[in-house]
Image: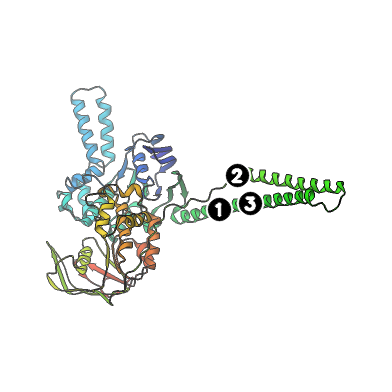
Amino acid sequence: MPHLVAHDVSLSLGPTEVLRAASLTVSIGQRIGLLGANGAGKSSLLRILAGELEPTGGVVERHPGDVPIGLLHQEVVGAGDGTVSGHLSTRTGTGPAAEELEAAGAAIASGRPGADSRYSAALDRWLLLGGADFDHRVDQILEVVGLGPRRRHQRVATLSGGQRARLDLAAVLLHKAPILLLDEPTNDLDGEGLTLLEEHLLRPDKALVIVSHDRALLRGVVTDVAEIDDHTRTLASYAGGWAAYQSQRRAARARAEAEHQRYVDRRDDLAEQARRQREWARHGMTSAVRRPRDGDKNIRQAHIARAQRTAGRAARTERALARLDPVAKPFQGWRLDLDLATAERSGDLVAELSGAVVRRGPFTLGPVDLALHFGERVALVGANGSGKSTLVAAMLGRLPLADGSRRVGPSVVVGELGQDRDDFAGEGSLLEVFTQAVGVAPQPARSSLAKLGLGADDVDRPARSLSPGERTRAVLAGFQMRRANLLVLDEPTNHLDLEAIEQLERALAEFGGTLVVVSHDRAFVEALEVERTWHLRQGQLVSPGGHAGSTSP
């Protein structure tokens, strides 16, 4: 059976240690969830496993040596340069395999030594990756994911964000490699797409390593968990699935905290015991020498001897303290220190649309009637392309209405997290772009960004160089300074690690203003305890007043 083994893999990028002696075995039937904080090295480890990145230490072995490994990156450079079909052939490896097969055939025709073996290996790889029926499968999969075969010749650059998410899903479904490495495959997928992905990942004929922040997917799919420790840069493995991982991790942390506390208690007890013994010895010696209770020198010498014995016990206690093996306090990594202080209360009516219609090319939203009141917590759901982002833009006044009316309360202060995270993608350093966008002085801006994990080394970087996760944190830092009373969050959990998502949930639970969330993260929406759910279907709001959990008629 094909499998992949990493032995003591280490990686350093310049002076920065990314991974230290990480070992992992990936076998058919295993579905490993790879976890770690943003920047912990998850994507780097995937690239090492796939052979794209050379480790600075250790080795990765493939069994057999020519087994294909598929890696689907989170962000694809140049993804919009070609057609849908060409993009899929590249991402699934069939395109490069076909090129190698053609080159091997040319080598045979020119009579080069070893060309026969090269051609045989190239043919085997092309067949294994599904090259023979690739065109047929592309049409089938494009139909399954909702894009349709008619889009196979469309340029990727012309696809919407939701359609690109469907295209990424198609690449996963098409990939024939027995070992598949997936970097955030759920980003921007809607409910139907998530269901298709989950069903595909449960197939028993593949070995998977999945980097994902989607707890519902991890809970339903993974058989094992591997986690990169942000402090030690080591990799720990947990067998038994998501629930077992959570239980084992809690138990391991509880043990570590208990061991540290036992060490602290023992250390403090010995230190206090030594202090008392030294004090008793000093006091006894002083009393014997300076204030003898009688003139008998033998009694005086006995008091001195007793004080010396006490001092000896103190010395032994101090040696025991010195021999005590220190137990470090369990490392508490960076935490998303988010305080969503609410601005002054807005009026009862936050936003209202009456018979509102928006037209964007061939797409029409509405007519829509809705009212959003202060303090409400609303989830906006619907398939990709149903008009969620358009509805948000119409409600906030960023798109003109072709018909109907709109009203936004006069005291409403909006904090918006857009799905494309382009708020701080302008020219200049992060600090320059942030201070201009938020309208604050540099020093408080530095403090706010630092609370979100963007420190001195980050604020002077070009804003465009920030990762999607870092841009998300910069937007959240802006929320802290604007003191919004209406938060509109479009897929807020994309690009955040699991710890940051849980901390965001806690911050939103304490937020006293109005909240509108667009999210396909099922666990996140459940944690927010929304009061109403707005369902959009093909530009129509089918349940504007329904309670959380209501379904479309």
**Percent position of residue 299, x then y:** 85, 49
The residue carrying mark 2 is 325
Within 10 Å of the Cα at label 1, are there few (<14), some (14-19), or many (20+) other Cα atoms? few
Distance between mark 3 and mark 1 Cα atoms: 16 Å
Asked if marks 1 and 2 touch (Cβ < 8 Å), the reply is no
Task: Give the residue type that dot 2 points to.
Answer: Asp
| Rendered residue at 22%/56% (across/down) | 161
**Percent position of residue 491, x then y:** 29, 60
Left or right, residue 507 beside residue 517: right
Q: Is residue 392 at least partly visible in the picture?
A: yes
The residue carrying mark 3 is 266
Which circle marks residue 376 in the picture? none
Q: Give the mark nearer the N terminus: 2 vs 3.
A: 3
Asked if marks 2 and 3 touch (Cβ < 8 Å), the reply is no
Q: Give the mark nearer the N terminus: 3 vs 1.
A: 1
Which circle marks residue 255 in the picture? 1
SS class, disc 3: helix
Image quadrant where one finds the C terminus: bottom left
Task: Give the residue type that dot 1 points to.
Answer: Arg
Distance between mark 1 and mark 2 Cα atoms: 16 Å
Q: Which of the two residues, 517 or 247, is positioned nearer the viewer here?
A: 517
Is 292 above or below relative to 525?
above
Left or right, residue 211 beside residue 534: right
Residue 404 occupies which quadrant of the picture? bottom left
**Percent position of residue 63, x then y:** 39, 36
Left or right, residue 19 beside residue 381: right
Q: Which of the two residues, 466 or 382, is positioned nearer the viewer here?
A: 466
Distance between mark 2 and mark 3 Cα atoms: 11 Å
